[in-house]
Amino acid sequence: MTQPQPGKAQNLLPLALIAFGAALLAIAVLVPLYSEDELVKASLSDRITLVSPAQSTGEDGPGLSQEFPAQVIDRCSVSSDAAKAAVLQAKATIRTYVTVEEPSTDSTVTYQAGTSVLVSEVKSQGDGQPKTLVPTALQRSASGAPAPKTPWSDGQCDNGLLLATVDRVTVGRHNGLPTAKGLSEVQVEPEQQAHLLPNRSGQQYRFPFDTSSKGKYQYFDVTTGTSFPVTYVENTEISDIKTLHFHVDVPETDLALVNMPVGYDEKEWTAPPGTTLTKPLNWWNIPNSPGGQDQTMHRFYRNGIDLYVDPESGVIVRERQDLRQYFAEPFSAREAASPDLRNFTLTILSGVFDYNQQTIEATVKQAKSYQDDIALYGRTIPIGSAVLGLVLLAGGGVIYYRLTR
């Protein structure tokens, strides 16, 4: 007896299963390729506060203690008629608030980072009584008014806000590098005008997805406006996140001259406000120096930065800074200066600043969120699509075979 041939309607089910299975296999192949730059990239809703208190290193030097692990210049000794400069023990914190702003697109993101150095409490070295400081917004000079002749000579010497900057930069959402035509500017409060940085380069607020210990990276330092090489140190784990430990060395830099064009005469250069200070030698308290002669010092900066990066997402999970700003003899005058003057420094800010536990918890959460997306698009969807696609192909083939046998 002849078997009845199946109708067209009966063939639709196995053919649909085969087509759907083939589509799922295509998804399994294409999603990992597409997700590299299109599906996994920096979020446009990122918003985080990074808090780095000064930390005791356990090897506290002169003028440092576990309770007051930082040092700051006594700004009132600068702005008043004090006979001598003074440096205070301090509780200090670096706080950075990072948000996403416009312009941001499908391929780029603009970060705005407001950074403040806050001093909550100070005391004189020795048995001085602690003094609480309250941070208030730095007052800008009226338009056209001359800049103060000396730092903190505007009656703000007791302000708990020591330094403040606002940084804006447009970067690629996958590699974290500044874009050629994107925004890049830094505003140092209380200055009114932001400084454009058209040739900015290097990582800063994030590293690329798939960061490698063998990668050649540069890190952009806002204070100097310069990028420096990143050196791989080791692999280490932070709160169940496997990170790459990198180090950045920012060498001694004269902030009075950092923006001076190449070839410009230093004597003709007008240094930014607050980067030079002229006081009598006896105020500086330099050994073996005559007392009445005025001495101009420049503001210097150096930093050792340790970055702990989640290699999958490029999120900086932890940042530690061994930071120092100080007044010292300009480079151009050191060769002719006496040894005492050549080696003299007066601390403006000094301390080891490290993310607190709440900040690390927030960065770990951010990194894990990206890791989940990477796992979803890189493994879960492709593997699931491949398995289901094979099942549907096999099932559709078996059904079609039986119907047409």
Image (cartoon, rainbow, N blue to C red):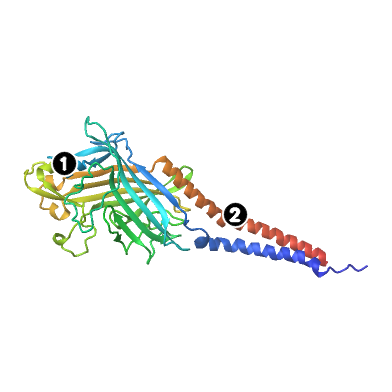
Res. 317 visible in picture? no
Q: Position of residue 365 (x, y in %)?
A: 48, 46
- Report how far apart the C-alphas of labels 2 and 1 lie in the structure: 63 Å
Identify the residue at horizontal 20%, vertical 55% (top origin).
256
Observer-nearest of 246 and 179 = 179
Mark linked to residue 160? none
Most extreme residue toward the right is: 1
Side (left or right) of 359 relative to 12 = left
Give the amino acid type for the residue marked by disc 2 in the picture: Thr
In this rendering, the answer to whether 127 lies above or below 271 is above
Regarding mark 1 in the picture, which secondary structure is present there? Answer: loop
Tell me the quarter of the picture where residue 400 sits: bottom right
**Who is closer to the viewer here, 288 or 158?**
158
Q: Secondary structure at mark 2?
A: helix
Image x and y of residue 65, in percent: 28, 34
Instruction: Tell me, for residue 380, which label it has, or none.
Output: 2
Q: The N terminus is located in which quarter? A: bottom right
290 above or below 182? above
Residue appearing at x 41%, y 58% in the figure: 101
Rendering coords of residue 323 (x, y %): 29, 46
Residue sitting nearer the eye, 303 or 116: 116
For badge 1, the amino acid type reads Ala
Q: Quadrant of the C terminus?
A: bottom right
Name the residue that disc number 1 marks: 85
